[in-house]
């Protein structure tokens, strides 16, 4: 496996993990809706 393929694989896995963690965090802590207008 080439170096670029390894980097791309790690990048994709990182995006999956971080995306799931952020989704779980945001679903447990809903953002407060602020009206600035």
Image (tube, rainbow, N blue to C red):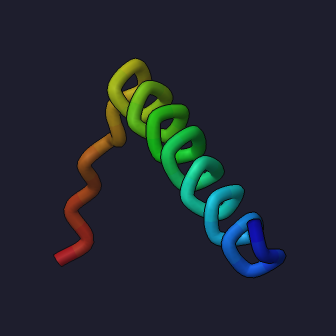
**Front-most of 30 and 15?**
15
Image quadrant containing the N terminus: bottom right
The residue drawn where x is 28% and y is 55% is 34
Q: Position of residue 14 (x, y in %)?
A: 64, 51
In the rendered structure, the answer to whether residue 31 lies left or right of residue 2 reads left
Q: Is residue 27 above or below residue 2?
A: above
**Front-most of 22 and 11?**
11
Image quadrant assignment for residue 17: top right
In the rendered structure, the answer to whether residue 13 lies left or right of residue 27 reads right
The residue drawn where x is 49% and y is 29% is 25
In the rendered structure, the answer to whether residue 4 lies left or right of residue 13 reads right
Q: Position of residue 7 (x, y in %)?
A: 75, 70
Residue found farthest to the front? 1
Image quadrant containing the C terminus: bottom left
**Front-most of 14 and 6?**
6
The residue drawn where x is 40% and y is 19% is 28
């Amino acid at each position: 496996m080439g170096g670029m393929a390894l980097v791309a694989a790690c990048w994709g896995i990182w995006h999956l993990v971080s995306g799931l963690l952020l989704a779980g965090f945001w679903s447990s802590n809903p953002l407060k809706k602020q009206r600035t207008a």
